[in-house]
Amino acid sequence: MLSKLQDMKKIKYIALFGAILFLLGSCDYNRRSAGWQYFDDMVTSPAYETYTKNPNFADGKTMQPPVEGTIARGMNPYPYQKTDEDRALAAKTLVNELQPTTENLERGKKEYGIYCAQCHGDKGDGQGRLYVSKKYPFPPASLLSEKMMASPDADIYHVITVGQGIMAAHGSMIKPEDRWKIAMYIKEDLQK
């Protein structure tokens, strides 16, 4: 009977040892593996790098342009072009809904310093660092002129958005709200 008990103890220890080994072996933690894969071709599909050839598209490119007419989330397309007619129309129809608060004027001043001052100057007199240093041969417009003082915020907003003459468009770089704040800063603080 004693040997039978010893045999039972040995079996229990072997079973316990086997269970522990099984548990330790089954706890393989690998972040790169989701576990079992049924349909390997769907789990590990071939990935294409951005600028590599791709046989799935007619033009053979992996990176495809957005569908025509797609508008990025949070963006509204600007309805006016870089023409004198559209500039006049924008000046008449666009309305700045922001109030000239200290916070808005400070933001406009900051954005002006980043995007405008290098050409138009810190004072808005057209004597920016690029022109004064002779790195830019054409004199930028003075924002202190009578014409600029008489123009509405919407005119400045339009010029910032699509550019004017040799000035490039800044609409892709500056958020619409900040363009209004720059226009407000030019009209409220810069021209005083």
Image (tube, grey):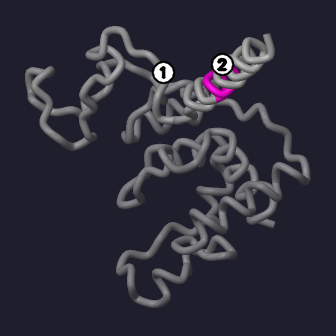
Place of residue 98 in the rendered image (x, y in percent of width and height, measured from the top left): 80, 37
Disc 2/disc 1 C-alpha distance (Å): 26 Å
Place of residue 53 in the rendered image (x, y in percent of width and height, measured from the top left): 12, 36
121 and 28: which is toward the camera: 28
- Which residues, given as a range, are shown in magenta? 15-20
Query: CB atoms at circles 2 and 1 under 8 Å apart?
Result: no
Q: Is residue 165 left or right of residue 65?
A: right
- Residue identifier under label 2: 15
187 and 134: which is toward the camera: 134
Q: Is residue 71 left or right of residue 99?
A: left
Element class at badge 1: loop
Of mark 2 and mark 1, the one earlier in the sequence is 2
- Residue 121 is one of the magenta-drawn residues: no
Q: Amino acid at mark 1?
A: Gly
Place of residue 36 in the rendered image (x, y in percent of width and height, measured from the top left): 44, 16
- Residue identifier under label 1: 35
Observer-side mark, 2 or 1, equals 2
In the picture, the disc for residue 62 is: none
Residue at 64%, 71% in the rendered image: 124
Element class at badge 2: helix
Residue at 36%, 60% in the rendered image: 166
- Relative to residue 36, is residue 77 depicted above or below? below
Place of residue 128 in the rendered image (x, y in percent of width and height, measured from the top left): 55, 79
Q: What quarter of the picture does the N terminus occupy?
A: top right
| Label 1: how many Cα within 10 Å (few below 14, some 14–19, many 20+) | few
Numbered label tally: 2
